Image: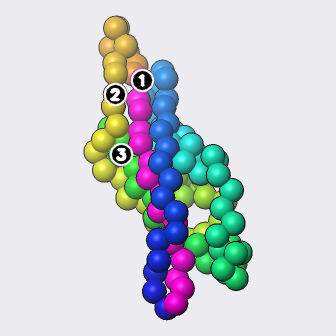
Amino acid sequence: MAKKRMVLEIGMGTDIRGGDPTKTACRALRDALWHNSLSIAPALGQPLEAMIVDIHIGVPRPELVDKNEVLAVLPYGKGTVTVVEGGLEIPNDAGTSSTMIANACVVVSLDIA
């Protein structure tokens, strides 16, 4: 058996006023996942839980992202989360809050022959 990439999805998430890196990361992941319905696992005779989901997030202040909260977005499969510096943060004119943008890349693989 070997891990084979089946799907690559890209998403973007924002937090318009709060500048919350975890909220932004979760929204980016939802954007990547919620635009498709993957039937690859059942088509290959695998259960949905057999999907290996590698989540890559680029967001300002990556050290503040709660990876467990991001993983909780997954409807099924076994996931891992990697968070790196990326995305964009735009402070408001008063400097009291910011708009934050995160990018997500989701790689779905199966362990197949």
Q: Which residues, given as a range, are shown in magenta?
A: 99-113
Secondary structure of residue under mark 3 = strand
Q: Disc 1 versus disc 3: distance between alpha carbons?
A: 15 Å
In this rendering, would 47 be left or right of 98?
right
Secondary structure of residue under mark 2 = strand
Q: Pinpoint residue 71: horizontal percent, then vertical percent.
A: 54, 58
Look at mark 1 in the image and give the residue it sits on. Answer: 99
Question: Residue 104 lies in magenta, yes or no?
Answer: yes
Q: Disc 2 versus disc 3: distance between alpha carbons?
A: 12 Å
- At label 2, which amino acid type do we have? Glu
- At label 1, which amino acid type do we have? Thr
Look at mark 3 in the image and give the residue it sits on. Answer: 58
Looking at marks 2 and 1 on the same chain, the residue that comes earlier in the sequence is marked by 2
Residue plotted at (41% across, 29% down): 100
Dominant SS of magenta comes to strand
Look at mark 2 in the image and give the residue it sits on. Answer: 89
Query: Could you classify mark 1 by the number of other residues whose Cα lies within 10 Å: few (under 14), some (14-19), or many (20 or more)?
Result: some
Q: Is residue 1 above or below residue 93?
A: below
